[in-house]
Amino acid sequence: MRLEDKDIKTREVTHWQGLHLFHFDMSSCSQKVRIVFRELGLPFTPHPINLMKDEQQTDWYLGINPRGEVPVLVHNGAVHTESNDIIQYIDENFASSEKSLLPQSGSERQAMQALLDLENDLHGDLRTVTFTYLAPDLKNRTGDKDSLDFIGRFHNAFQALDERLSDSAYLLGDRLTLLDISWFITLFRLERAGYPLAEHPRLAAYFLRISRRPSFQTEIHAGALPMRFVGAAYRRFSRLIRGSLARDYQRWKSQS
Ligand SMILES: N[C@@H](CCC(=O)N[C@@H](CS)C(=O)NCC(=O)O)C(=O)O
């Protein structure tokens, strides 16, 4: 989504030339965009915004994205938000025809948009998973942790993805597209939190396979070392105190 020029209060960015990305190491939406840049072999100027230090809430940054979120792409002074729109914008405008990650046909493009929207709709639930099982919820970012409805929403989405893989290697046919990249970090986070991906066997096998791509590997290891250390320690602590998502999945299943 391109923001209107009149809404950009931090005017200096409207003079920036080239491709600039405001992002954070461990933000799923930022990871998605960085993977696309890597897969397409495109250089960009990174501008880290540290969400742990609330840098997204400074007047300077709010003057670029009033929602106070990353990622933001600035291309020749125009400001773009929404990661799924950003990755399509990058591909449409910069990818060579050999490297493009867009589907070919109009019907595939429609199918892609519907599943990108589903991925975006689950962003709040991904946040719940992250701050329930993977990282301390220091800022009270999650809603009702006792309802397991969010698990059902992931289960249903993963069933739909699993079905798409019944006769193709990727979510939209025989080659990697933006759709695979968009879902990857969600799958990675859920798996890491203990979601039993084996419940969706084709999706589990596909996830293992695409995880080996170098661009995906880089993002799996994103984040400063101390933060990754804290994350690993927290995961163990949280499993002891709260139990894992694997256990909650079984609870959800027995209730549904
Ligand atoms: N729908 C947006 C969601 C962006 C979003 O929520 N970004 C998170 C990081 S993944 C963020 O900046 N959060 C800031 C905060 O929690 O204050 C997108 O896909 O770009």
Image: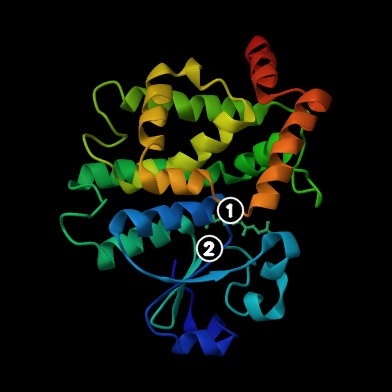
Point out the residue furthest to the top here: 254
Mark 1 lies within 8 Å of ligand 1 (Cβ measured)? yes
Looking at marks 1 and 2 on the same chain, the residue that comes earlier in the sequence is marked by: 1
Give how far across and how far down residue 195 sits, in percent: 59, 25
Identify residue for label 2: 71
Residue at screen point 32% across, 65% down: 42
Q: Is residue 178 left or right of residue 8?
A: left
Q: Are marks 1 and 2 in contact (CB under 8 Å)?
A: yes
Asked if residue 38 is positioned above or below residue 47 in the image, the reply reads: above
The three-letter code of the residue at mark 1 reads Ser
Asked if residue 60 is positioned above or below residue 201 in the image, the reply reads: below
Mark 2 lies within 8 Å of ligand 1 (Cβ measured)? yes
Quadrant that contains the C terminus: top right
Q: Is residue 164 left or right of residue 118?
A: left
Give how far across and how far down residue 235 sits, in percent: 72, 33
Give how far across and how far down residue 105 sits, in percent: 18, 46
**Residue 27: assigned label:** 1
**Residue 123 in view (yes/no):** yes
- Secondary structure beneath dot 1 equals loop
Q: Is residue 39 left or right of residue 66?
A: left
Q: Is residue 4 left or right of residue 227?
A: left
Specify the color scheme: rainbow
Residue at screen point 72% across, 59% down: 52
Give how far across and how far down residue 118 sits, in percent: 47, 41
Neighbor class of circle 1 (other Cα within 10 Å; few <14, some 14-19, many 20+) is some
Asked if residue 32 is positioned above or below residue 126 in the image, the reply reads: below
